[in-house]
Image (cartoon, rainbow, N blue to C red):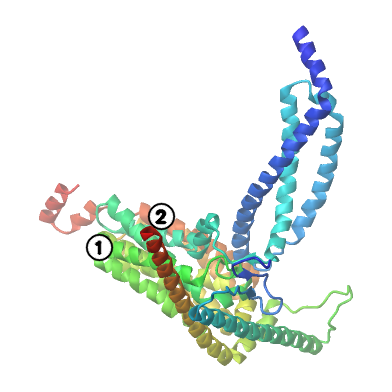
Amino acid sequence: PPAHSRCDWIGPPDRHSHLRPVIFYVPPEESALERRLREARQEAQASNQRFWARHNRAFRQEKEEFIYSRLKAKGLEMKDESGQKATLNAEEMADFYKDFLSKNFKKHLQYNRDWYKRNFRITFLMAQVALVRALRWLRRRKKNVEQ
Amino acid sequence: GLFVWRLRSAGVRQTPCRFVHLCRMADDRLITFQYFNFLKRMYVTQCNRDLSQRAKPKSDPIVSPFHELQQLDQEKKVVHKISSVSPVHQSWSETSGRNKWRELKSAAETEDSVIAVGAESKEDRRWKEMKLQLDDLPGILARLSKIKLTALVVSTASAGFAMAPVPFELTCFLLASLGTGLASCAANSINQFFEVPFDSNMNRTKNRPLVRGQISPLLAVCFAACCGVPGITLLTLAVNPLTGALGAFNIFLYTCCYTPLKRMSIANTWVGAVVGAIPPVMGWTAATGSLDAGAFLLGGILYSWQFPHFNALSWGLREDYSRGGYCMMSVTHPGLCRRVALRHCLALIGLSAVAPVLDVTTWTFPVISLPINLYISYLGFRFYRDADRSSSRKLFFCSLWHLPMLLLVMFTCKKSVLEREDKGGSHEAAMEIRLP
């Protein structure tokens, strides 16, 4: 994002976590409240990024391992004659999906609790910041009218 | 004759200037057209992508822009050939010049639209300002409130209103529909607010406004409040308190029960079916002001319909659900998923047969609706037996037209008010005849 810009910038989805990274703009006259908001958002972004990148990587890896083990059990190779990667059909993959979901169930419960808490906190801080800014703007207008 | 000759000679002398002038004009227009076509194309492709993702989550849009670019290169060459030959002929008359300009314009348009398609995927990879664009706001809010789903919900509520055994009141109908629509917008916005990181990881939902940063979470919550509070207030004050209470309960059920439950247990599907069943009940209570057996019947029909609809849809999304951590029957209990879908297809036949018993419709309704109910049950059976992608897709697409058709047939077979009162006794009938 250009140096003179005065707002946050959001980028394309990350390759591993599929989340869109945000670069936060730090205004020179940032108040304590605004700084708390920005830090909360940065922290949430980092935590989400960590979780999903690791989770998606684990998914891909375990999927590969599953396909490999099933193909070996059937006596096939990873690449067939035409050189294309051999895949299993949806029914066979269903076993893997069910397994993966149940294995990560507790992890997801924990993440959900975490995410909801963070989301509420960030939105509440946003509301506070918006309110303070609105009051400041009203006060400035009153001053301008009086002058 | 002389006059024409003069024009011609003047034209010929000015040939190069005219052509250059035309090119310059075309250039300016090119830029504005680029902008407009880009916006148009973005909206159209997004609509298409939304619809197509529902059916084929693994669709690959990357192939087509390159294909189109190749075709366009050839087109461009042809256009340039024409432009080099025609300047001499062009200046003969104003109209031919305009034609030439139109050719350039159409070439520019097709070029721009292809560039737009290619650029759109590039746009997705660019860094963008997180600032609210006011011109895009209607589109953003439409996507935030899932306007197409809201429209479907409002139509089921209107069906409930229409089926109620009371004389039709237009203002009440419009107010009830508006209130239901606003409540649905609010619920959908809150749902998207809760699900941002999960939506980013699923193919079907990764283009939602909150995921793309087009709107801030605070604004989404404010929008939900601005829809929900007036909507429920409207229902409570202008229609009746029962409808308002049902609306508020439905919003609560959807946002606070269904959305978190999706990640905790497969029971979410049943809760979701209740959420879908409440709007027609709301329509009915808006008309009559009370919860009759007919309201429950309509709710029951929609409840049963949700299962073949959703279970078939979720069959193709198992990978995304598994990775995203959603507890859906299609992933954890595939056999149950198919059994439940079939069970509820058959229940639809049963419920349609109960309709005349409750005086909601005449006996023609179960007879006329039998073919479509049998067809969806057949597809449900195929899905149960084959359990593959094609049978699930067939069942899903059937459910999309089955519901509107069933409701339409139901409405045409509705038992008229006078007929119903006839049963109640002679003096009651005398009273009813006085009513309009």
Q: In the image, residue A17 lies at what x, y percent?
A: 67, 79
Picture layout, residue B412 above or below residue B314: above
Q: Is B231 placed left or right of B50 in the picture? A: left
Amino acid on which disc 1 is placed = Leu
Q: Nearer the viewer, residue B335 or A123?
A: A123
Mark pair 2, 1: CA separation: 32 Å
Pointer 1 local density, CA inside 10 Å: few below 14, some 14–19, many at least 20: few
Q: Quadrant of residue B239?
A: bottom left
Instruction: Determine which of the numbered discs, if any, sits on residue B237 in the image.
Output: 1
Q: Nearer the viewer, residue A30 or A49?
A: A30
Indicate which disc, 2 or 1, sits on the residue closer to the N terminus: 1
Closest to the camera, between mark 2 and mark 1, is: 1
Instruction: Determine which of the numbered discs, if any, sits on residue B181 in the image.
Output: none
Amino acid on which disc 2 is placed = Val
Q: In the image, residue B429 lies at what x, y percent?
A: 15, 53
- Are the residues at dot 2 and dot 1 in contact (C-beta closer than 8 Å)? no
Which residue is drawn at the image coordinates 24% and 53% (left, top)?
Answer: B417
Q: Which chain hosts label 2?
A: B
The quarter of the rendered structure image containing the N terminus of chain A is bottom right
Q: Please indicate, yes or no, whether residue B272 appears anywhere in the rendered image.
A: no
Pointer 2 local density, CA inside 10 Å: few below 14, some 14–19, many at least 20: some
Picture layout, residue B33 above or below residue B340: above
Q: In the image, residue B35 lies at what x, y percent?
A: 66, 49
Furthest residue in direction front, as rendered: A147
| Element on which disc 1 rests | helix
Q: Quadrant of residue B221?
A: bottom left
| Element on which disc 2 rests | helix
Residue at which label 2 appears: B409
Q: Nearer the viewer, residue B135 or A114?
A: B135
The quarter of the rendered structure image containing the C terminus of chain A is bottom left
